[in-house]
Amino acid sequence: MPSRRTLLIGLTVLALMPAAGSAADLPDLGGRAIVVVTENAYPPLQFVDPKTGEAVGWEYDAMNEIAKRLNAKVEYQNTSWDAMIQSVSDGQYQIGMTGITIKDERKEKVDFSDPYMRSEQFLLVRGDEARFTDAKSLGAFADGLIGAQPGTTPFYTAVYEVLDGNEQNPRIKLFETFGATVQALKAGDVDAVLTDGTAGKGYVDASEGGLKLIGGPLGSEDFGFIFPKGSDLVAPVNAAIAALKADGTLDALNRKWFLDYKMGG
């Protein structure tokens, strides 16, 4: 079946698998308990709602629906991005989710689900930024500092697409979480943050003009859930992702989190 792409606010959800039938056609995990780990620092995919103090987001809704359709019980735990892939690889958790880009080198440590989302990379800057307008002019602005998390797609995009390819470039300032990079941007400690359109739009909408995205997209990435190598959960989760794509559930989540939800408001 040909792929179907639905574009929504810089986000493309991919229909890469044959449409699933009814929920009754999906595997039944018999109430199996599954521990899912996340970072809670990547709005609107997963974050702590400032209005309620509860952990919410696109990925929580999607995973809860997947668990419901597969007859599984999900428990959520938190860890840092730096520890996530290794901890899932070690079997400490059964599934990891935090907008994780599907990369061949990561497949050496973990198994990925089929893609559930595609997003493009953009530059996030303060709302009054006028010293540069895109990646090229930022690269030429010698005093410009870029915030990033080590080992992430935004880090490598900053190094290889914006700067000179030197991973030790002093213009890159490293932070443990994506949220910390945004706080540094707001405080003036860095001048730009590389982000995908999903998280970037969430922060822009919440900033009331304090932040903006500039320039065109700097490449795209597919997101997937991660599992320990050889996990028997990959096939059931893939089947559920296909069902959520086929019946419009993922499109509904896109509308909820990328159009309707307003952080802090």
Image (cartoon, helix red, strand yellow):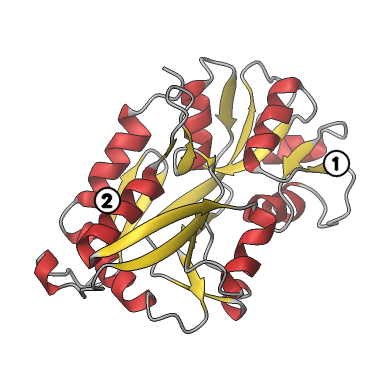
Outermost residue, bottom side: 230
Residue 118 lies in quadrant = bottom left
Indicate the amino acid at tag 2: Leu
Instruction: Describe residue 82's horizontal placement relative to residue 242 as left or right.
Output: right
Element at label 1: loop
Whether residue 81 is visible: yes
Residue depicted at x 59% and y 31%? 214
Q: How many marks?
A: 2
The crowding category of the residue bearing disc 2, from other C-alpha atoms within 10 Å (few below 14, some 14 to 19, many at least 20), is many
Residue 183's place in the image compared with 45, above or below, is above
Residue depicted at x 23% and y 72%? 30
Quarter containing the N terminus: bottom left
Residue depicted at x 38% and y 81%? 232
The residue carrying mark 2 is: 250
Element at label 2: helix
The nearer-to-camera label among 2 and 1 is 2
**How far from the left and from the top, in percent, is residue 25?**
12, 73
The residue carrying mark 1 is: 171
